Amino acid sequence: MKYLSVPAAMLVVFTMAGCNDTAPKETQTVPQDSVTATNDFVPIFDGKTFTGWDGDTSFWHIENGVLTGLETKDHQLKSNTFMIWKGGEPSDFEFKAEYRISADGNSGVQYRSEMVKDVPYGLKGYQADIDGADTYTGQNYEERGRGFLAMRGQIATIPANEKPVITGSLGNPDSLKQKIKANDWNEIHLVIKGNHMLHYINGVLMSETTDNDTTNRKSKGLIGLQLHVAPSMKVEYKNIQLKQ
């Protein structure tokens, strides 16, 4: 998730400015993809071992079939760390998992990402954001990159070397927040096709991003699960599936 918080006033300016811009014509936003059936999804976590995954196992463990990231006041991170799937660098795909996160937690599903030099298990790239307070859950954030791409409730298009342009709305972000269960299991579902990215929580579309920035966008890369620097937190993932 984010490294720097963005003041509310800046977000208002960002949104208003985006609404007044004209969306670039390079790539039109395609219609919203429907949530597809699960019968073509393949499990990528066996619930028992780290087979196919790589990360700092002093912070990650497997508990009752659940991949768990844990940070305590006596064992804290110096930089964000990721449990990284080693099965490839998907381009177009769908990803599904169930997650549960503590109230003070900060996490996310990283995708189309690359390793960060000199940062053990560090990734940079697109992220489907998750946090325990559900301030940012569902948004599209680029870790160690361009930052906020589409906040919850936004349909955004990203021109070349410019800030995102808000081209539509998926609903009030506070109303969408009500679809997310606090301190309970939720389902995250990502539909990633070409330069078009859809983030769903519990079957509800939370953000939609079309990336026309041919210089900075990524067409493929690693998938990872984030454990963010915090005084303490816990995040859990299970039923992790992928369809390519």
Image: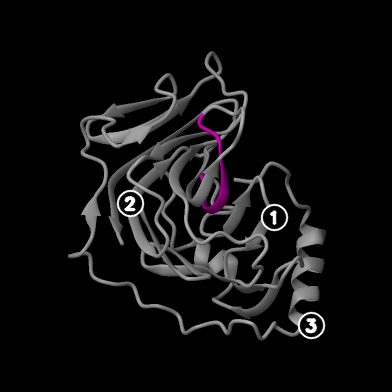
Element at label 2:
strand
Q: Where does the magenta region start and end? A: 121-132
**Residue type (three-letter) at the residue carrying disc 2:** Ala
**Alpha carbon distance from label 3 to label 1:** 21 Å
**Residue type (three-letter) at the residue carrying disc 1:** Arg
Q: Which residue is mark 1?
A: 146
- The quadrant of the rendering that contains the N terminus is top right
Q: Nearer the viewer, mark 3 or mark 1?
A: 1
Q: Position of residue 197 (x, y in %)?
A: 49, 67
Q: Position of residue 15 (x, y in %)?
A: 74, 71
Residue placed at 74% from the left, 85% from the top?
22
**Alpha carbon distance from label 2 to label 3:** 36 Å
In the image: residue 241, left or right of residue 149: left
Q: Which residue is mark 3?
A: 20
In the image: residue 80, left or right of residue 86: right
Residue 97 is labelled as 2
One can see residue 184 in this view: no
Residue placed at 31% from the left, 62% from the top?
244
Residue farthest to the left?
39
Disc 2 or 1, which lies upstream in sequence?
2
